[in-house]
Amino acid sequence: MPAPDPATLIAQRGGLATTRELRRAGARWRDLTQAVRDGRLVRGRRGRYHLASVETHAVAAYRMSGVLSHRSAAVHHGWPVKHEPDRPEIIVPRNRKVSASDQRDHHVRWRRLEEGESGSGVTSHLRTVVDCARDLPFDEALAVADSALRAGQVGKQQLAVAAAGARGSGAVQLRRIARVADGRAANPFESVLRAICLDEGLDVVAQEQVVDHGLWAMADLVDASRRLVVEADGYEVHGTRRGFRKDVRRYTEMVVFGWTVLRFTWEDVMLQPDFVRWALRSWRRARDGRPVPAPPRMLARLR
């Protein structure tokens, strides 16, 4: 089996990854070194790698006398996101003229810059989370907020205060993000899965203990009232054969004690969310004794 491409692995992790994470995922040292030499990856401090496009986003913002914003700002702050933006996301002052070609090649928003942002070239930590919560889809915005809280660069109370005073476009979603954001989420993969669960009406909590008589286990997402565990099951998460065996036993024990365990891969969550939604809805239908519709892939095949 060929070794995975390091740049692809980093893109799947929202544009950032540590040496340890890449090695656990199967990346080879020589491939990492070559990717840096080719200019596809940049090696930062403390063994952290990021896509070279992060550098080009900052250059574009500087050239346009603007600042990095939204997902471009999040990646600049060191926060993994659901998907790195395909175009630099930039805020320019309201009176700034931007050429048609720059508007085509960049996602430009005309807004007021806060004090100090022009000098730093990027929106502040809090503003980055607020802007994403206002303007991005719920799952992407939640991934950014979770990453900011996990990094300790934005506080839960700080975000709640900002949301309480918000008005105008996106304020409702901002307040929802402030309410459910959780720094315990392990990564954007888990954040996006939690967003889907919340949209489907499940009361899931990140990194929660499953406790029963004779059972103690940590799970990615838990809806205790429904005795449901939802796992974001990355290929490399088990690490070793021993880790794989331990996780399989953990899943089996939870089922034996009456918990339902639903497991989803990165590809399911990030690339085929309709399947995840179908699985969650169908589990609830089956639980209520109602008929279960065919999975999306089967419906597509029947057409």
Image (tube, rainbow, N blue to C red):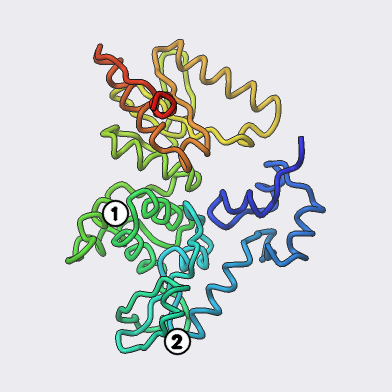
Q: Position of residue 133 (x, y in %)?
A: 32, 59
Residue found at x 39% / y 66%? 128
Q: Which residue is mark 1?
A: 178
Amino acid beneath label 2: Ser
Q: Which residue is mark 2?
A: 65
In the rendered structure, which amino acid carries the disc numbered 1? Ala
Given residues 281 and 201, the one toward you in this image is 281
Quadrant position of residue 230: top left
Residue 228 coordinates in the image, percent (x, y): 37, 23
Residue 198 x %, y %: 30, 38
- Of mark 2 and mark 1, the one earlier in the sequence is 2
Which residue lies most toward the front here?
303
- The residues bearing labels 2 and 1 have C-alpha atoms spaced at a distance of 31 Å
Does residue 236 appear left or right of residue 282 in this picture?
A: right
Residue at 50% x, 15% y is 253
Q: Secondary structure at mark 2?
A: loop
Q: Which quadrant holds residue 59?
A: bottom right
How many neighbours does mark 2 have within 10 angstroms: few (below 14), some (14-19), or many (20 or more)? some
**Disc 1: CA contacts within 10 A as few (<14), some (14-19) or many (>=20):** many
Q: Is residue 265 above or below residue 83?
A: above
Secondary structure type for disc 1: helix
Q: In the figure, 75 relative to 295: above or below?
A: below
Q: Residue at x 70, y 49 (%)?
A: 5
Is 17 drawn above or below residue 263 in the view shown?
Answer: below
